[in-house]
Amino acid sequence: MVEQISVGGFDSNFSYIIHDGKECAVVDPSGDVRNILAVIEKKQLRPIAILITHTHFDHIDGIDAFRKIHPAPLYMHKRAVSRVHTHDSIKRAVQEGDEIQIGGVTVRVVYTPGHIDDAVCYYIEKEGALISGDTLFVEGCGRVGSEADAEVLYENLQRLKELPDETEVFPGHDYGSMPHSTIAHEKKKNRFFLAENLEAFKKERL
């Protein structure tokens, strides 16, 4: 199961808890970490992992506060390892296609650079859920810094469009008309998904 938690933070950030009713992982602990801790306590979950979608500060600024209470290891893309300033012994590098087991829940890593080169999404196929960080928002997508970045992000959004229509999209920020949506909704309403080709995407994003 995926629990979406509004944590405020830099700009309407979301954190997430992935759990099987007993063990859990926290995704992007940031903002007001107390909101995350309250859900964990209420549901009596045991955190065994922290998953990072990417290393922009507003997605990782709650790591230390969370780990003071629950000292779980950190999972992040291999490009992110040197950018997270904590002891190397608690870091776990992941890459495209890796699977992370959270109790009875299997989480697959989908490498989606473009917004930043260490960005990943976490796909829980059995639950039909995609935690998309700043790669894909409800009716939007992450910013890019160059035409090259735009091309990479465009290619990765095409990959995400291939997920089943009913897949729930759980973004890193509350930017859209609803807190979370589906791939089907994004195909209809997201102008970046609707871009006919790379050039049209660049005109929208750059």
Image (cartoon, rainbow, N blue to C red):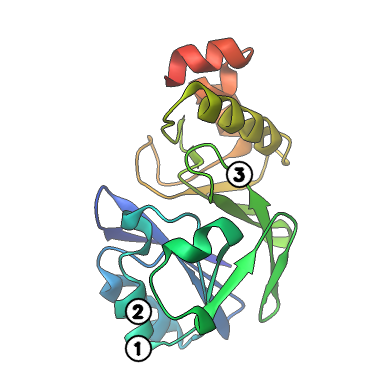
> Can residue 73 be spotted in the picture?
no
Q: Residue at x 73, y 63 (%)?
A: 98
**Label 2: few (<14), some or many (≥20) within 10 Å?**
many
Q: Could you tell which of marks 3 and 2 lies nearer the N-terminus?
A: 2
Spatial separation of the CA atoms under disc 2 and disc 1: 6 Å
Q: Position of residue 13 (x, y in %)?
A: 33, 53
Q: Residue at x 51, y 65 (%)?
A: 81
**SS of the residue at dot 1?**
helix
Q: Is residue 111 left or right of residue 73?
A: right
Dot 2 and dot 1 residues touching (CB under 8 Å): yes
Which residue is label 3 attached to?
112
Looking at numbered disc 2 in the image, what kind of residue is underneath it? Phe
Spatial separation of the CA atoms under disc 3 and disc 1: 30 Å
Q: Position of residue 203 (x, y in %)?
A: 47, 12
Quadrant of residue 197 within the rendered picture: top right
User: Where 173 sits versus 95, above or below?
Assistant: above
Looking at numbered disc 3 in the image, what kind of residue is underneath it? Thr
Dot 3 and dot 2 residues touching (CB under 8 Å): no
Looking at numbered disc 1 in the image, what kind of residue is underneath it? Ile
Which residue is label 1 attached to?
69
User: Where 112 sits versus 18, above or below?
Assistant: above
**Label 1: few (<14), some or many (≥20) within 10 Å?**
few
Q: Residue at x 46, y 88 (%)?
A: 44
120 or 27, nearer to the observer: 120
Dot 3 and dot 1 residues touching (CB under 8 Å): no
Image label count: 3
Q: Position of residue 101 (x, y in %)?
A: 69, 75
- Residue 201 numbered tag: none
Q: Nearer the viewer, mark 3 or mark 1?
A: 3
- Residue 66 numbered tag: 2
Spatial separation of the CA atoms under disc 3 and disc 2: 26 Å
